[in-house]
Image (cartoon, rainbow, N blue to C red):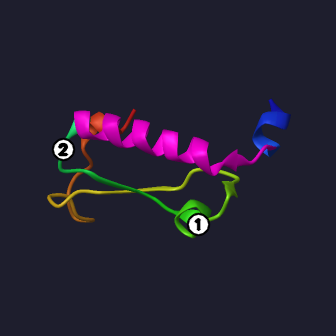
Amino acid sequence: YFEEFEKRIPRAEMEEMEALILAELKKIDPEYIGTICGSYRRGAASSGDIDILLTHPNYTSQTEKQPKLLH
């Protein structure tokens, strides 16, 4: 699998993954906000990985973690 990890992820595939991830996130809780960051956010044609920032208006650094997300 080492060769798989060395491959770049094309932007079109990143867009597909973004749609899939955000759809699944909405199933958990529609208030979650998912943002794909890193080279994708900067407009790169490909990326080495997928960086995702998850936020929620009701959770802060002082709030206990939501158990559903800790698998």
Q: Quadrant of the C terminus?
A: top left
The quarter of the picture where residue 58 lies is bottom left
Q: Pinpoint residue 53: horizontal percent, then vertical percent.
A: 41, 58
CB under 8 Å between discs 1 and 2: no
| Position in image of residue 19 (x %, y %) | 41, 41
**Could you tell me which quadrant the N terminus lies in?**
top right
Report the side of 46 relative to 14 (left or right).
Answer: right
The residue lying furthest to the top in this view is 1
Foreground residue among 32 and 68: 32
**Residue 45, position in %: x, y?**
67, 58
- Which span of residues is magenta-colored? 7-27
Q: Which residue is mark 2?
A: 30
Residue 13 falls in image quadrant? top right
Q: Is residue 25 left or right of residue 46?
A: left
Crowdedness of circle 1 by 10 Å Cα count: few (<14), some, many (20+)?
few
Disc 2 is placed on an element classified as: loop
In the picture of the structure, the residue carrying the numbered disc 1 is 43
Q: Is residue 32 left or right of residue 46?
A: left
Q: Residue at x 50, y 40 (%)?
A: 17
Q: Position of residue 39 (x, y in %)?
A: 61, 64
Residue 8 painted magenta: yes
Say if 44 sits above or below 54 in the image: below
Residue 60's place in the image compared with 11, above or below, is below
Give the residue displayed 17% in from the left and 61% down from the top.
Answer: 57
Q: Residue shown at 24%/35% (left/top)?
A: 28
CA separation, marks 1 and 2? Answer: 26 Å
